[in-house]
């Protein structure tokens, strides 16, 4: 079994959002309830999509959302620019993809989601934000949402992205397949790729280097309906983001 990377004794702290970014995020947050609605995913949908009550093997049985301000602080601190592209692996309803498109000047903000129903809701949500003017044309043009598994074939442009966010257990398993493809695709900037892993320390592999970790406030698990009341009650807690670089070979 691959050994995990050694990590610092204490996580670092992210700087607050710049004032303009904080104001922009506040306006976006106000628009999201109308564009995406309340979270409601019956257990019947999960069973129909995956053939079982819970998620595929190595997936969490409950849906959760990372705090958008916390991830926004992470993205802004990384100074993502037009030469960069961002990928959220396990993007759910696509809200973090939208945050990346709105708060940074990335060339493209990608979301990859396994669930067909979540992907469809994410696409509708982006369309509503654009139609309502909550996102301008440049921001809307940056968003790309893909339905599928990272272990499968993905668009070549996505594989050329510079920054990846891994948010679920399954995304870590899929990343083992994905990283082989990334190693063969050096960035035009000749920089290593950045990989952020939420809550999990990645195992050692060739070209992967541990850099630092951050504690971020706000992982929200909303109440969910189901015969076993999975995730019932809704709660919020902090989470740790581990940062790595991946060198192309």
Image (cartoon, grey):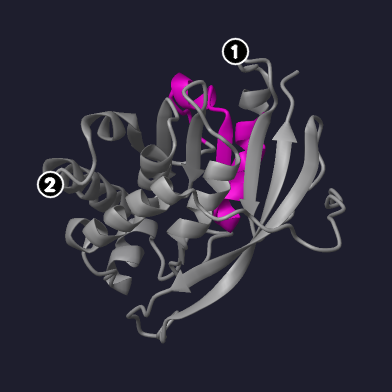
- Neighbour class for label 2 at 10 Å: few (<14), some, many (≥20)? few
Mark 2 or mark 1: which is in front?
2
Q: Is residue 71 magenta?
A: no
Q: Residue 222 at what x, y percent from top left? A: 39, 75
On screen, 172 above or below 217?
Answer: above
Residue shown at the point (53%, 43%) measured from the top left: 76
- Please provide percent x and percent y for residue 240: 66, 61
Residue extending farthest left: 131
Residue 132's disc number: 2
Say what secondary structure mark 2 lies in. Answer: loop
In the picture of the structure, the residue carrying the numbered disc 1 is: 188
Please say whether residue 175 is one of the residues in the magenta stretch.
yes
Question: Which disc, if any, is residue 159?
Answer: none
Q: Are marks 2 and 1 in contact (CB under 8 Å)?
A: no
Q: Can residue 110 be spotted in the picture? A: yes
Residue 138 placement: quadrant = top left
Give residue 217's quadrant in the image: bottom right
Front residue (pair 229, 16): 16
Query: At 82% across and 43% down in the image, what residue appears?
Result: 204
Q: Position of residue 102 (x, y in %)?
A: 36, 41
Q: Position of residue 215 (x, y in %)?
A: 66, 62
Apparent side of residue 15 relative to residue 9 in the rendered image (left or right): left
Q: Which residues, given as a range, are shown in magenta?
A: 152-179
């Amino acid at each position: 079994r691959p050994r995990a990377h050694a990590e610092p004794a204490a996580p670092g702290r992210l700087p607050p959002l710049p004032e303009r970014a904080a104001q922009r995020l506040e306006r976006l947050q106000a628009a999201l309830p109308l564009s995406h609605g309340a979270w409601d995913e019956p257990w019947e949908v999960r069973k129909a999509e995956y053939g079982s009550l819970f998620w595929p093997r190595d997936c969490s049985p409950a849906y959760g959302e990372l705090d958008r301000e916390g991830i926004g602080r992470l993205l802004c601190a990384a100074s993502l620019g037009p030469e960069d592209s961002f990928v959220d692996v396990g993007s759910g309803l696509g809200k973090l993809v939208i945050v990346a498109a709105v708060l940074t000047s990335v060339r493209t903000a990608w979301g990859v989601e396994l669930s067909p129903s979540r992907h469809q809701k994410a696409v509708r949500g982006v369309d509503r934000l654009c139609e309502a003017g909550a996102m301008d044309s440049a921001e809307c043009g940056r968003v790309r949402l893909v339905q599928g598994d990272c272990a499968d074939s993905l668009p070549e442009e996505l594989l050329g992205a510079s920054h990846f966010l891994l948010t679920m257990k399954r995304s870590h398993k899929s990343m083992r397949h994905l990283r082989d493809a990334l190693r063969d695709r050096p960035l035009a900037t000749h920089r290593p790729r950045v990989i952020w892993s939420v809550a999990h320390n990645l195992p050692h592999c060739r070209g992967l280097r541990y850099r630092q970790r951050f504690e971020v406030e706000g992982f929200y698990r909303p109440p969910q309906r189901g015969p076993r009341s999975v995730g019932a009650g809704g709660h919020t807690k902090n989470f740790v983001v581990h940062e790595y670089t991946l060198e192309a070979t």
